[in-house]
Amino acid sequence: MAQNTKYIALIVLVIVVVAAAAFMFFQKPGAGKEEAPEKLTVKIGVLTDETGPTSDVGISYAKGVLAALKYFNEKGITTKDGVKVELSWVKRDYAYNPTKAEEFYKEFRDKYGVIAVLGWGTADTEKLSDTIINDKIVYISASYSAKLTAKPYNFFVPPDYSTQACIAISWIASVKPGAKIALLYDHKVAYSRSPIDAIKAAAQQLGLEVVADVDLPLKATEADAERAVLQIVDKNPDYVWCGNTITSCSLAAKAMAKQGLNAIMISNVWGFDERSKDMIGPEGYGKAMGVSPFIYPAIARQQNIPGINLVLEAARAAGYSDTDVNLRFLQGFLSAWLLVQAIERVDSQALMDKGGEALKEVLEASCQGQAFDFQGLVAPARFCPGRHIASEQAYLVLLNENGEFELKGPQSAPEGIDCAQITIQAGG
Amino acid sequence: MPAGVFKETYGEEIAIFRYPIHYAGAALGLLFALMLPILVGPYYMLLAVSFLIFLVGTVGLNITVGLAGLISLAHAALMGMGAYVTAFLAEKGVNILVAIPVAGLSAAALAFILALPSFRLKGYYLAMASLAAQFIIEYIFALIDPDQYVPIPDEAKYLGGIYLGRGLPLYYTTLAITIVSILTAVNLGRSILGRAMKAVRDNDVAAEVVGINVYYVKAIAFTIGGFYAGLAGGLYALYSSGIGWEGFTLEGSIEYLGMVLIGGPGRIVWGSFLGVLLVRTGWTLLESTLADLIVSYVAAALKYLILGGMIAGFIIFEPEGLIAVLRRFKEYLRLWPYSY
Amino acid sequence: MVEANILVGALFQGFVLGLIYALIALGFNIIYRVSKSINFAHPALILLVGYVALVVSRQNGIAAGLIISLAVAALAGLVLEKSLAKPLIGKPPVALIGATLGAFYVIRGVTFIVGRFEAAALPLQSTYYSLGLLKVSTNDLVSMAVTGAGLLGLILLHNKTRIGSAIRAVAEDAEGAAGYGLPVSRLMTLSWILAGLTGALGGLALSLKAQVNPYLDFYAIKAFAASILAGLDSIGGVVLGGLALGLVEQLASIVLEPYLPGIGGHIAFFFLLLILLVKPYGLFGTERIERI
């Protein structure tokens, strides 16, 4: 007994000593301030989904991000005051698992000391949106959720999902006043649900009628798509909004053709891209379109948009072929480009002292000052404090009767209705 | 001097510390756990926190699956129950250290309900019932959490002015809760209840014949497993700034089952330890290592090939789990330089 | 009140999908019967089949895709048996469950190499036929043909041939079967190959109905639940279970949607739990399953 007590006393003593030592070790003040060197290194974390459920687009997006980082790095980046900046990045595939995203985010922060993260999906971005405020890390995501626009450290290049959806509604109102709209989306998934309240409000204001609101699972089969379409067929909608991702939306477009529903399906940005042509098939030609704040690379090449040459050059330099440069690649490229442009506007001393906060400040300085320009690939972006809605402009891309993509617009968001705000207020 | 260690009483035989190496191992292990933040730096410390959280959950499943032989595919849902209860209480202003045990209890209550099918079912059928339960609970989560994000208010994470949700306080809080739950689990395995569970696992008819209340034992095995899952969920809410239901899906349950089966079912502590280390933390470390070394798509495929290959390989060559390898090694050391 | 055309469409589509669920569920069932284990590699196999079919049929047409994916799946079944099931004979069933979980990861990795996890549709030209209220497409017909042939072939093999009765004997009592001189080891191998083949047919039909995407394995796990709905011990029971899953999913989505948003994909599991609680041996299963 006495011996046990001795053991326990010893163990307690060791615990106390070690814990105290650990605390002292961690309380050590950070390294002292350094003089402004000739070259600065900016560390960036890249969070991707290459093997998870969204990897069908995640891989291309990641390629775009990496190509841009590599390209601008080699080309040379300088801050506002002329100090050379070298980018150094760490890429992690989190397979769309939010717990793993968190682990990797902490790796970025604590092991590599990144000041900016190029992130991916809704789950991880929203989960980290409060943490990054404390850590002062700028987070540029591929999730364009309206809720993120109110967060101080979240940024993205295009308008948010709700504003994009409202742009589509306002386009419908301009081509067909009084049109009937049916909504198809997954009623359980936050990503699909997020723009719905804004759509309903905008439709009401613009004199359109929402005639149906039907559940279409994100992981849909033809059976689900057909059931959803059958439920809206007799409502005779002129337009169908599909708020899911590409598999689900292209199945819906196919089902519309099969059931003879003579309406046009409009998908959000993740529900429609170059692959839609094959995934929908000839029977849906002329009946499907997508909202896209970005000009599709193929169209940009036809129209000689200056920015696309830069993207192609970067892609080739990174060893990708021109066919790798699709919409998703472009989206990734632009996210990284926004970060590079922010670095080019920052003051080197501020960057060293404040890290991510300095980047946030220059990004938000665009509110009154000069917008971030992407050479015509997407509308110039301005971010205002508390309202990070880059622009209020998007295109609509129609898959026309010949199976070609046709650009409509650019269309602006409807006047006098704050679509992002509606979504923020609707969800907690 | 006897040539080996001989036990003279039954008490000595089932003691936690049976050999000198156990004292040494426990002391060194504890010391290592305590010093870990100094040894490895902040990132690996937080990775260790995530490891400990899943270790608590896996220990729970190991009681249900390993000790009592009841296959459950609803463990992630139970963990989610704990996380949501914690989030709910934290929102109401309850301190997280109070919320975490309550989370454990509520997940235990849910697990008790899930245990009902096990009164009539075994093996494949039970796996199926728990699979159904997982889907049903997932659906309920989706209904109560339509935004897929419930923030955990920081105000709930303070203890006497120290913020527990970050850095060293987070690590030591998690470590303390983990050690307490593991010690409890170890003692459970040695108790009458633990032996009754093993009896039910090995032959339920015989167990009933010798007077074990099989229904009671099964229900308790599920309930305790659920309690640990709930604790893990509560700890996860402490570790994370917010939770969403996509963290508690069937994939999570399958991963849990994998960690138990691979580490060694029935070896509650070390089996779970190795299972989590290999499957969960292993995946993260593999990604970190491979992504820096090789082209991205090769790394992406390779981590699945390595992980899966290791899992299958260990089970084939060591069906009792990784822990058997270590046990043989330990025996070898103990008997060294003699072979027996 | 549900209109007739919605009902007819949902019933038909539920039926087509039910056949797919049934065939995939049979893959689980076959392995359960001979190895007493849950084959967690089966969902990954479905994913692999989808991507093999996609890659091959883009180059050489859908028929080649079918043949190659059948071959790949049969090979995968063979490899799984030789490398996992055989060494683990006599070990507790959980060992094989764990090992197949490992195989799940490996096959996922292989699939990634094969198909890079893109999302695409199999290149099959769609034509639509109208039968009164019902609209039928080429996809529906092909997937019905594929799954129907698979189910029919399996039922015939199982009930009418000597091999089928030998496999049933092994499933019943492997040692007893060996005592009667049956080549138990070879029959087990054959069962795993058969499970692979059913997976290939089911996976191919699934790829038509849900397109090829990185989460095809999700449907296979759903199908797993179907294997018990009507009882494990007869092929007919599994088929009924699959059909019930497909139909309930569609009907519930229509009827219950206003009250419970997004219930469709989950409703079958409420039924499953209920059935297991009330009639643990399944709706039509015989009552002598292992239970206390």
Image (spheres, coloured by chain):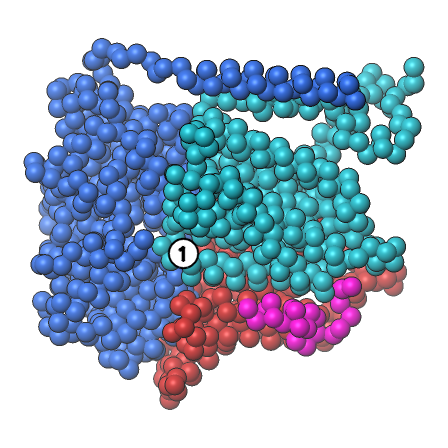
Chain colours: A blue, B cyan, C red
Q: In the rendered image, which quarter contains the N terminus of chain A?
A: top right
Q: What residue is drawn where x is 29% and y is 32%?
A: A137
Q: What residue is drawn where x is 76% and y is 49%?
A: B197
Image coordinates for residue A398, horizontal then vertical, percent:
19, 62
The magenta stretch spans which residues?
A: C270-292
Q: Nearer the viewer, residue C29 or A131?
A: A131
For residue C54, side relative to residue A362 (left or right) = right
Image coordinates for residue A419, horizontal then vertical, percent:
19, 57
Q: Nearer the viewer, residue C287 or A291?
A: C287
- Given the image, on which type of amino acid does mark 1 rest? Asp
For residue B173, side relative to residue B153 (left or right) = right
Image coordinates for residue B188, horizontal then vertical, percent:
73, 41
Residue found at the very far front of the displayed protein: B160
Q: Mark 1 points at which residue?
A: B145
The part of the image, by quadrant, that contains residue A414 is: bottom left
Tell me the chain of label 1. B
For residue A360, side relative to residue B75 (left or right) = left
Q: Nearer the viewer, residue C292 or C178?
A: C292
Residue found at the very far bottom of the displayed protein: C132
